[in-house]
Amino acid sequence: MEESTKYDTLKRIISIYLPEDVSVDAIGAQSHLINDLNINSAHLVDIVLDVEDEFDIMFENDDMERMQTVEDALKIIDIKRSKK
């Protein structure tokens, strides 16, 4: 999967869980999921589950803790997919 396609897929997943006061345009590689995008912890779990399904990977607890930004999520996806 191309980098831009992977980013677009992740952006689409995240956008589902954005609060009403945060625009999809606010999602960037450096966007902090909690601080910048106001994703709550329950929705963060939903995002992880959706990412696992979409990319056919499994997150470990420490992966979830390291996933602070959109870029972090992309890196974790790359690592997990390279191990398949």
Image: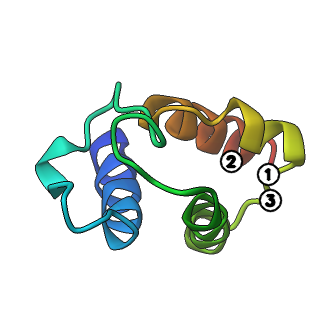
Q: CA distance from mark 3 to mark 1?
A: 11 Å
Q: Nearer the viewer, mark 3 or mark 1?
A: 3
Label 3: which residue? 58
Amino acid type shown at disc 1: Lys
Quadrant hosting residue 32: top left
- Picture coordinates of residue 31 (x, y %)? 34, 32
**Image colouring:** rainbow
- Label 1, residues with CA under 10 Å away: few <14, some 14-19, many ≥20: few
C-beta proximity under 8 Å, tags 1 and 2: yes
Apparent side of residue 72 relative to residue 31 in the rendered image (left or right): right
Residue 11 lies left or right of residue 73; in this view the side is left
**What residue occupies the far front of the structure in this picture?**
21
Q: Amino acid at mark 2?
A: Arg
Q: Position of residue 55 (x, y in %)?
A: 59, 63
Residue drawn at x 43%, y 34% as measured from the top left: 35
* Residue for point 46% across, 42% down: 33
Vertical arrangement, residue 32 with respect to residue 77, above or below = above
- At label 2, counting other C-alpha atoms closer than 10 Å, the crowd grade (few under 14, some 14-19, many 20 or more) is few
Q: Which residue is mark 1?
A: 84
Query: From mark 3 to mark 2, how far is it between C-alphas?
Result: 9 Å
Name the residue that disc number 2 marks.
81
Mark 3 residue element: loop
Lower sequence index among marks 3 and 1: 3
